[in-house]
Structures are given as C-alpha cells and as structure tokens.
C-alpha cells in the first residue's frame, strides 16, 4: 500500500508543522502507528493519530493540537476545500481489467456510463477503451462540487451518474452500496464489477426497497419523531432537520431536533422517539438499518410519512453541491 | 426537578438567540425532549438537543448551529469560562440531614473537612452547623479554577480537599467515586454519606488500589504503548501525552500518541498496543477499567511503569488549574 510518505515529508519540510495529525478511515487505522513512526523519523514534527471513527472526507478531524492534517483513503470533497489538509487517496493496485472483461458479457448498451470510487478512479481510461473496443458507446460524467473526479461516486453523491444520458452503468469497485446507490439514484440498470472478488452482477435494488418501505410503513404508525442533524463538517444539514421537525409538528406529530456527531444505536437510546430521521450521513441510514431498534428514515422517506411526497416517488438521499 | 425554565427564557429574551442548544448529561437526557418543547413554546428560538454523550462541564458542545448553549447538570468550570453558556446546575432537593446525622457517629475529628458535588453544594452551611454542634471543628476548602464552589469536588479535581488541613473528610453525595478520590488524593479517612441510599460508610480504597496495581504490574510486561490525548474542550493534555510518548521511546518502548474524543473500548481496538495511557478524563480510566481488554493507565501510573516514579508513590490523576 502506498501511503505517499515522500509527499508527506516534502509537505512537512515546506510547511514546517509542529504537530502533524494522521487521520485514517476505520479499515486502514491498523496501519496508522507504523506510518506515524516512519513520518516522525523523517521529519522534525510530532505526529499524532486521530483516534475517532472516520468514514469519509466529510469528517475531517480539525480538533485542536495539529498544524497539518493528513487524511488517508479518501479524495478531497471540493466544496469543503480547507487549508493544510493533505489527502493521500490510497489508490488500489488491483488489476480491474479481468473483471471488466467479464462484465462486457452483461452490458447491453448502446450507451454505458462508467462509475467507480476513488480507489479505482485512475483505471477509468482503460475501462473506457475496453468498453469502446467492444463496440459500445461510453460516458464518464462530471460530478458536482461534492466529488473530485469524473466518474467518482460517494455514498452520499451520485452526481457523476446523474450527469450523463446512458442506458446503463458499469460500476467498478468493491461493496454493494455504491452500485445499489447508482441504480436507485438513476433508476437505470447497473452492472457491478468487483475486482477484489472478481465477480460481476446486475445490482438488484428490490430487497433494499422492500426493507426501506417496511421501515416507512412502520414509521407511519409513529407519533413521535426525533430528527437528527449531523455535526461532522461535511454532514451538516441543521436547517433541513429543523424544517422537517416543524413540518412534522404542523401535521400534529410530536417532533424535536437533536444534533449528533456519530449516529449510533447507543446514542439514540437516550432520545425517546417511535422513529428517527437522519439528515447526517445517508449511508448510515441504509447500511446500519438492522442495528437500530426503531425505524431510522432518510429525509425523503420522512416526507412520504408526512404525506408531503407520494409513496411511489422514492428517491435516494444525496448531498448535492451544485 | 428544576430545569430553571424561567431563567432560560429570560436569557433568550435578552440575548435573542436564533438557535438554542440544550446539553444534558447522560442521566438526564431522557428529560431533554420535554424541556426543549417547553422552551420552544415560550421563546422565539429554535431549540435543538445535543445528542452526543456528555459527562461533565469539561465537555461543552459548541458544534455549529447554535447561538446559545444551555448546559444542564454541572457547574461551570471557571478556567473554561466561555461566552453564552447558561449553566443549569440541577440541585438535588433530597434532605441530606438525616444521613449527615447518621455520619456523626463515624466522625472522629478533631477537624473535619466537608466535600460534596454540585448537586448538594447548597447544603454545606447546614452540614457544617450540624458537625459543629456535635463539637467538631469543620473546614470547607476553596478550590482552584477547575471548581466553582468551596467544598465541591469533581472526578478530576480534589483541590477543595487539598486546600484544608483536617484529619478526615465528610463527603455528602451519591456514588463511590468521589469519596474514594478524596481518600486517594489526600491519604485521609473519608466518611461517605449518601443521602439517596441513606447510607454511611468509611471509604475503603484498598480494592481499588489492588486493581490499579494489578494493571500497573500487567503493563510492566508491555513493550508497545498508545498514549491517548482527549479532544474535549476541558480534557486536552496533548503536550503531556506527547511528553509521555517521548519518555517511553527514550526508554526503548514502542509508543505513539492518538487524539480521541470518547475513550471507549471500541475506539481502542483500532490502535494496537499492549497497554494504553489515558491523559483525558481520569474517571474513565478508573471507572471503566473492567471494560478495557488491555491495561489503561493514568499518567502517574505510566510514570511508575517507566521507572520515573517510585512504585509506592501512588497519586491520583487530577486536572489542576492553579
């Protein structure tokens, strides 16, 4: 894995920070002590690790004590562009071409959009050529100010997919969430090509939709709602949260707003409500649904419960930044 | 329970905040939605609740979005004096006198110091008279800038006990931690009078000391240490943390520093080490010891492990603010 030590050391020589904080997402945190030691050996700075959970570039640790933040594993979110953050994107060196070749058999076209995450974003040119050689037209969308690279999708932003007019998408990368998100966000067919498992599949949103509508149905019986507003730098939507609280009250519900840093089942136990609305990270709402004892809805789903939106007009919750 | 709604409403009328955030410690959070509703009905402000865990006035929630913070359940920490925080101290109305009368039988004097927490600090005058009527001399200490009231102790500060020259202390209040802390901090006899359970007892520090020395002994075998520095406003000791890391390295140990908001067993899993040093809240180190898989030491205990302090020179970890 390339932690770009040389670039970090160069930046430290240039900016002369007294204290450097290293922030790793959960999956990479175990490498942190070693990386810290290497950087400390090569610079004059004190290196400290950020010990709080981190799941995205929306959650930069600017807590006191550091002059330079080095954030690993995510690309910068342009709308949050901040001084003195060095992003080490941690590209994967896995060869995506075998699984892309496998995926060709599932692509119908005639126009295919390529989407991926930051780990594989450098492979888009190769993937594109492969698809075009197979005789299909190919598009890569420019996203909004929430994403850095053309074709890049986040758990909270599918603007690169929205931006192009295609019949279907090829998602290159691991995990089920992103391709499901593209499928839900666009209503189009998505072929997921996982280069780690060497597996291709058509993303099937039906199970997820059943789960979401089951939670919406359960929330229709609720009389008390707690609307959550995130406090992490890139997850703040307090105005939306409060507007939803007011909407709910106008319709006769009991509702209140709580700000929260980490949306976890434990944190919600303290706030009695029959259902919750999460305006912070949309991915937690969907991925962690089974961990919460009561329904936790997205703002869109809550609009359905309030009767402000037709039950058939499902939309994914996104953070867009036009 | 008196949430001082009238004082909050008066303050809101005077300062005209657009958004008021209410912050409750864990034990009072369940009352938060009701209090929010009452305040919202009587002011023009939007009221939001702070959803993050809170265990003291060291942990003020200044996350964005609110113009006025109302903090319930703790007294202000003078050294952190901040603008636009309204402290609602939540005094207990339990009658402490029956249990204080019970405690008289255990007091030997001739000089007794009174210590308590903010819940009962208004009873000190009565308690004092009771002790004096019984023929004993009585002192109430002035604390440092970490505590607001004479006689008040915190889990991290026993300066009111240090300040007076007495043979023993009477602690008025619930829980075992504070009287144990006074006993450890001063080395004197402490009679704990719990007005909720109507129980009096001589604080026995021997079990706690056995537990602490067992952890110190275990840490003597460790080669790798992770030193934790808290990021909560009133728990920051990054310089101390880094100094300990450097000390450990000078003595041939592998050590690194991590900053952390909530020191929990889950957060530590991400940072491999054979033992940890917690420079944040001292109470977590002691109270949560059984929850951590590896030894978590106080800075003082770590000095013992490093051979910088005699093993017999145990001292409680305190945040003092002269």
Image: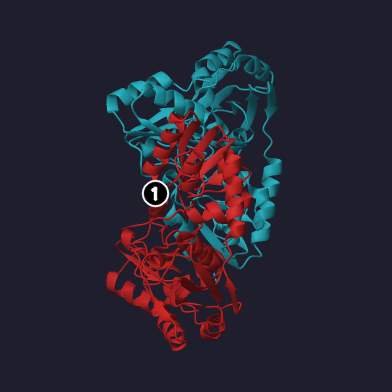
Chain colours: A red, B cyan
Looking at the image, is B231 positioned above or below residue A154?
above
Q: Position of residue A110 (x, y in %)?
A: 44, 78
The quarter in which the C terminus of chain A is drawn is bottom left
In terms of depth relative to the viewer, which is nearer, A248 or B100?
Answer: A248
Q: Is residue B193 above or below residue A149?
A: above
Q: Which residue is mark 1?
A: A236
Viewer-proximal residue, B75 or A205? A205
Residue at (29, 62) in percent of width and height = A83
Asked if residue B294 can be seen in this view, the reply is yes
Residue B41 percent location from the top left of the image: 40, 23
Q: Residue furthest top?
A: B133
| Residue at image coords 68%, 58% | B217
Q: Is residue B89 visible?
A: no
Q: Quadrant of residue B9?
A: top left
Rendered residue at 53%/25% (across/down): B119
Subunit under mark 1: A
State the residue lying farthest toward the bottom: A133
**Disc 1 packing (10 Å; few <14; some 14–19; many ≥20):** many
- The residue nearer to you, when weighing B306 against A54, is A54
Residue at point 55% right, 25% down? Answer: B113
Q: Position of residue B64 (x, y in %)?
A: 36, 44
Most foreground residue, B292 or B7: B7
């Amino acid at each position: 894995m390339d932690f770009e030590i040389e670039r970090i050391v160069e930046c430290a020589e240039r900016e002369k920070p007294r204290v450097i904080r290293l922030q790793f997402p959960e999956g990479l945190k175990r490498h942190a002590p070693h990386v810290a030691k290497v950087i400390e050996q090569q610079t004059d700075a004190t290196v400290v690790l950020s010990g709080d959970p981190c799941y995205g570039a929306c959650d930069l640790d600017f807590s006191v004590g550091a002059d330079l933040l080095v954030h690993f594993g995510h690309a910068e979110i342009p709308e949050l562009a901040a001084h003195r953050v060095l992003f080490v994107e941690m590209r994967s060196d896995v060869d995506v071409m075998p699984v892309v070749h496998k995926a060709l058999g599932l692509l119908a076209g005639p126009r295919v959009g390529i989407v991926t995450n930051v780990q594989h974003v450098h492979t888009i040119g190769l993937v594109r050529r492969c698809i075009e050689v197979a005789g299909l037209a190919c598009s890569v969308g420019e996203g909004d100010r929430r994403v850095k690279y053309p074709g890049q999708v986040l758990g909270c932003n599918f603007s690169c997919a929205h931006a192009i007019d295609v019949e279907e998408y090829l998602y290159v990368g691991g995990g089920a969430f992103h391709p499901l998100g593209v499928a839900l966000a666009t209503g189009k067919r998505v072929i997921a090509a996982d280069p780690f498992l060497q597996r291709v599949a058509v993303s099937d949103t039906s199970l997820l939709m059943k789960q979401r509508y089951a939670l919406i149905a359960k929330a229709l019986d609720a009389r008390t709602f707690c609307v959550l507003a995130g406090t992490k730098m890139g997850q703040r939507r307090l105005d939306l949260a409060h507007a939803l609280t007011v909407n709910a009250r106008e319709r006769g519900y009991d509702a209140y707003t709580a700000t929260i840093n980490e949306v976890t089942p434990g944190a919600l136990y303290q706030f009695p409500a029959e259902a919750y609305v999460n305006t912070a990270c949309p991915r937690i709402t969907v991925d962690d649904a089974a961990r919460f004892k009561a329904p936790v809805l997205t703002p869109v789903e809550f609009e359905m419960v309030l009767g402000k939106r037709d039950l058939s007009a499902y939309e994914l919750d996104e953070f867009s930044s036009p």
